[in-house]
């Protein structure tokens, strides 16, 4: 992932959410617009823990948007399709 964008430094139980357009596979920023390697765009949203991130995802569902949750080791811990409502 380092070639595409810089992964944030996470502490302890923090996780990062990445948004992806399910139709195109494009990475989206926090405003749900395509990431164009613009320094003003914020791609990862950081949360204190998994529960906080999952709550955000459940409350911010959008059509054709996939959310991926990463731990501090850049491992995927929750693809959105596995989150129960």
Image (cartoon, rainbow, N blue to C red):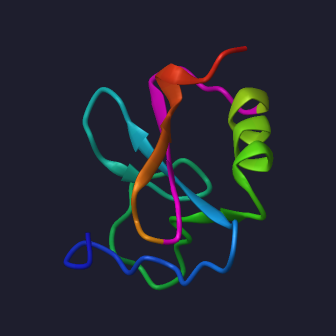
Residue 65 coordinates in the image, percent (x, y): 48, 31
Residue drawn at x 51%, y 65% is: 43
Horizontally, residue 85 falls left or right of residue 16, namely right
Q: Residue 76: horizontal and vertical position, in percent? A: 42, 49
Q: In the picture shown, does residue 46 fall above or below 32?
A: below
Observer-nearest of 79 and 20: 79
- Residue at 55% x, 65% y: name it: 44
Q: Position of residue 84 (x, y in %)?
A: 66, 16
Span shown in magenta: 60-72
Q: Residue at x 69, y 75 (%)?
A: 12
Q: Quadrant of residue 59?
A: top right
Q: How many marks?
A: 0
Q: Among all residues in the image, which is located at the extreme left?
A: 3
**Residue that sits furthest to the top in the current view:** 85
Instruction: From the viewer's side, name the closer residue of 25 and 75.
Output: 75
The residue at the point 52 percent across, 61 percent down is 71
Query: Does residue 36 appear left or right of residue 78 in this picture?
Result: left
Q: Is residue 62 magenta?
A: yes
Rendered-image quadrant of the N terminus: bottom left
């Amino acid at each position: 992932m380092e070639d595409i964008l810089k992964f944030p430094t996470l502490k302890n139980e923090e996780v990062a959410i990445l948004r992806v357009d399910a139709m195109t596979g494009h990475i989206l920023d926090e405003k749900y617009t395509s990431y164009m390697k613009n320094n003003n765009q914020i791609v990862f949203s950081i949360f204190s823990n998994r529960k906080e991130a999952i709550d955000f995802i459940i409350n911010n569902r959008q059509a054709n948007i996939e959310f991926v949750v990463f731990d501090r080791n850049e491992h995927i811990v929750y693809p959105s399709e596995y989150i129960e409502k």
